[in-house]
Amino acid sequence: MNLNWKIPGYEKAKGPCCGVISCAIAAQVSFDDAWNWHKVKLKAEGFKRFKGGTTSAHYTSFLEEKGIKHKLLCGRILENSDVTDFEIGKTTLVQFSGWTAKPDTVYLVTTTGHAQILYNGHVYDQTAVRAGAGVPIHKHWGKLKKVQQVLEILEPEKITHLEFGLPLFDYHNMKGVH
C-alpha cells in the first residue's frame, strides 16, 4: 500500500487543521473535501466560525460518511501480565509507534492537542506537508505527546487507476475483475 499523503489542496493546510488533513489523508480525499465536511458538521453543531479545529469524535463520523473502514483501538492488558500494549493518556506517540503499530498499517492518532497519521514509523501532518514527506517518528516534534485515541484505517486506498496512470484493463486485472 502506498500512502498518498500529497492529497489535492494539501498546500492549504495552515493553522489548526491537523485533524482535517489527517482525515483527508486517511480517506484519500482532497483537503477541500475534508475541510468543507468539517466546516458543515461543526456549523450544524452550533459553531459559528470554523477555523480548522476539530475533535476526535468527528474523525469517526467523517470516515464512516466517506465509507472508510476503520476500527477504534483501545489499550489492553497483555495476558498474564500487568503490561499493556498502550495506555490511553500515558503512552507517547513514539512508544505507540514502536510497541504497538503494525507495519504497513495506517493509523489516525489523536494525541494531546494534535492529530496525525502514523504509517511505518513516519508521521504525516502539516509538518509532513511542509517537509515534502512523512517525518520519521524519532524526529517529529510531537513524538512525546500522549496518545488519546487511535483509529486503525482498514481501507485507506481511495485512489483511482487514473491517478497512477494505469490503463483501465490493468486496474481491473489488479482488482481481480474480469
Image (tube, rainbow, N blue to C red):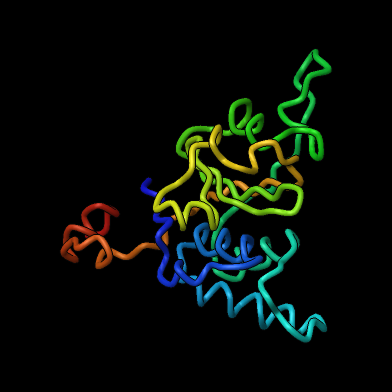
User: Which image quadrant is residue 50 in?
Assistant: bottom right
Q: Is residue 147 left or right of residue 12?
A: right
**Residue ranking furthest to the top:** 80
User: Which image quadrant is residue 38 in?
Assistant: bottom right
In the rendered image, the vertical position of residue 117 relative to residue 46, given as above or below? above
Measuring 65% from the left and 48% from the top, which residue is drawn there?
A: 109
Front in this rendered view, residue 71 or 8: 8
Q: Position of residue 92 (x, y in %)?
A: 71, 34
Disc count in the image?
A: 0
Measuring 19% from the left and 63% from the top, which residue is drawn there?
A: 165
Residue 56 visible, this orientation:
yes
Measuring 75% from the left and 33% from the top, which residue is drawn there?
A: 91
Q: Is residue 113 left or right of residue 118?
A: right
Front in this rendered view, residue 120 or 124: 124
In the rendered image, the vertical position of residue 30 relative to residue 90, given as above or below? below
Q: Position of residue 78 (x, y in %)?
A: 75, 21
Quadrant the C terminus occupies: bottom left
Residue 64 visible, this orientation:
no
Measuring 38% from the left and 45% from the top, which residue is drawn there?
A: 1
In the rendered image, the vertical position of residue 71 relative to residue 47, given as above or below? above
Front in this rendered view, residue 91 or 84: 91
